[in-house]
Amino acid sequence: MTHDIAQALLDAARKAGADAADAMVIDGTAVSIDVREGRLEQAERAEGLDLGLRVLIGKRQACVSSSDAKPEALAEMAARAVAMAREAPEDPYIGLADPAQLAERRDAEGLELVDNSPEPEPEALLDDACRAEAAARAVRGITQIDQAGASYSRRTIRLAASNGFEGGYARTSRSTFCVAITGEGTAMERDWASESRIFQADLPDADSIGTEAGTRAAARFGSRKPPSGRFPVLYDERVSSSLIGHLTSAINGVSISRGSSWLLDAMGKAVLPDGFDLIEDPLRVRIPGTRPFDAEGLATGRNPLVTDGVLQRWVLDLATARKLGLDSTANASRGPSAPPSPSLSNLTLTPGTASREDLVRDMGTGLLVTSLIGSTINPTTGDYSRGASGFWVENGQIAYPVNECTIAGNLRDMLMRMTRANDARPYLSTLVPSLLVEGLTIAGA
């Protein structure tokens, strides 16, 4: 069905006067269950199509989206897109891929992105959610459960373009989560646990997820502000990927082509310590972020971004690559209502040899961050400030939970003063271990 709709969209675009076009069709099913105090609070099921059409007339383009696949609706959609494109400003860098650039692979065979076992019954999801909630509530010190739920989804994605590309694949997901609270009134603190897998058989037991949420929240009882000053900060594995995310945002082709990145002059220079590699691998088997081709039909593959600490390349789609006089790195991503833009999937920062406990011991006195709140990042200078909570460490031992503090520094300096642990979870799309950063400014009590 998605094949027929995609081709019908392209035919409609040609008839409406488009010089070129590409179409995206997403056919999806999603089920979610939320519970409160052992009873069903909310149940949702969504089924439907998301259709996206991009048309090009010369160097002008426009995107439209819809959920109506009737022939007359597709014709109207194409006519609207062409009319919009004729009024759009010219962009000399837009355009579909040359046929010689297109991926030979057009599906996700062998990548294990789909669980073909039956869709779970709502009763099974309800049972997972209730068990997670009950397990969290059973942890000593938990006063209430804020949220608990379970969900399932299956999506089929089809991309077709007038340059001859057509490909598609499906993916599934099964998830369970719980958010627990300790304390009362203004002294309430919360924490959470969540797990998601492509294959339902790989998902951890709901009781263990609830217990982890409760244990994490109970450990936050009695949180207070830490002292102010300059201290080492250890980013727990749950939040450490945010640091690498700031780096990848700074090397995104959009920021580079606009000249608005704090790493604008960093190509071929050290951006991480010696021995650090940052690699994108969009073809990892049984991983949620895996994709066999990008949103412009180019073949994805292993993409070394940083080697031995040195920046190797920008993250590019076709338009940003043309603007910079480079080749696309096959990083185009898009939704039904927008044109392609660069983005990454399946990142791995090479691990160290130390455990998180080793880094806690070695840091002496400082802050272990388990949650980050808000952010102020200057995109051109890399100045960094974020709200944080976690645990205060004294003499290499966790002393007490902390909240309501701010950590600040400059990202270019911070990233060069990192020590990595070895605790990245192998089933995640982004594999970044706990990271110890020396000499950050903490504003607390």
Image (cartoon, grey):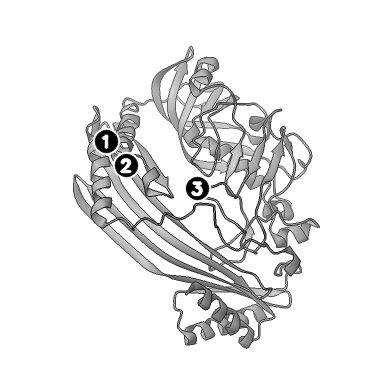
Q: Position of residue 349 (x, y in %)?
A: 61, 36
Crowding near the residue tagged with mark 3, few <14, some 14–19, many ≥20 C-alpha atoms within 10 Å: many
For marks 3 and 2, give the CA distance: 24 Å
- Three-letter code, disc 1: Ala
Q: Which disc is residue 386 wearing?
A: none
Kindly report which numbered mark, 3 or 2, lies closer to the viewer in this rendering: 3
Q: In the shown orientation, is residue 38 left or right of residue 371?
A: left
Q: Where is residue 115 in the image (x, y as percent from the top left)?
A: 42, 54
Indicate whether 59 appears above or below 116: below
**Label 2 sits on residue:** 178
Q: Disc 1, disc 3: CB below 8 Å? A: no
For marks 1 and 3, give the CA distance: 29 Å
Crowding near the residue tagged with mark 1, few <14, some 14–19, many ≥20 C-alpha atoms within 10 Å: many
Q: Disc 2, disc 1: CB below 8 Å? A: yes
**Label 3 sits on residue:** 286
**Label 1 sits on residue:** 136
SS state under label 1: helix
SS state under label 2: strand
